[in-house]
Amino acid sequence: MVKVVCPECGGAKSSYAVSCGDRGCQTGVRACEFCKGEGQVNSEAGERWRAGKGMRDARVKQGRTQEQEAEWLGISPMDLNDIEHGQRFFG
């Protein structure tokens, strides 16, 4: 299977993050959630991510919330979130 640079992190594998809890806020490094810190994904996953991002960009441009878009598409907001984040294809 062909590997491509992760479209979420651009191959960086991780990013800096700030997390806050009952002990205050702390900085740290977190692995990319999409590629799980590998910096690469298979080409199918890359295409899913690009398709989902395109759907999200169009929805935001039209001023619709995920809840409104999910209702219009006849799917749950949770499913739409997965689609927009490249976790699954629409359809």
Image (cartoon, grey):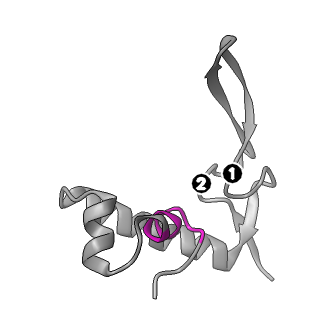
Q: Is residue 13 left or right of residue 49?
A: right
Q: Quadrant of residue 44?
A: bottom right
What secondary structure is marked by label 2?
loop
Residue at 55% x, 67% y is: 49
Give the residue type at disc 2: Glu
- CB within 8 Å, label 2 to label 1: yes
Q: Nearer the viewer, mark 2 or mark 1?
A: 1
The residue wearing badge 1 is 33
Magenta part of the chain: 79-87
Q: What x and y, as percent, mark residue 25?
A: 63, 14
Q: Quadrant of residue 8?
A: bottom right
Residue 8 is labelled as: 2
Give the camera-side residue of 70 and 18.
Answer: 70
Residue at 39% x, 77% y is: 75
Q: What x and y, as percent, mark residue 15?
A: 68, 35
Spot the residue most to the front: 22
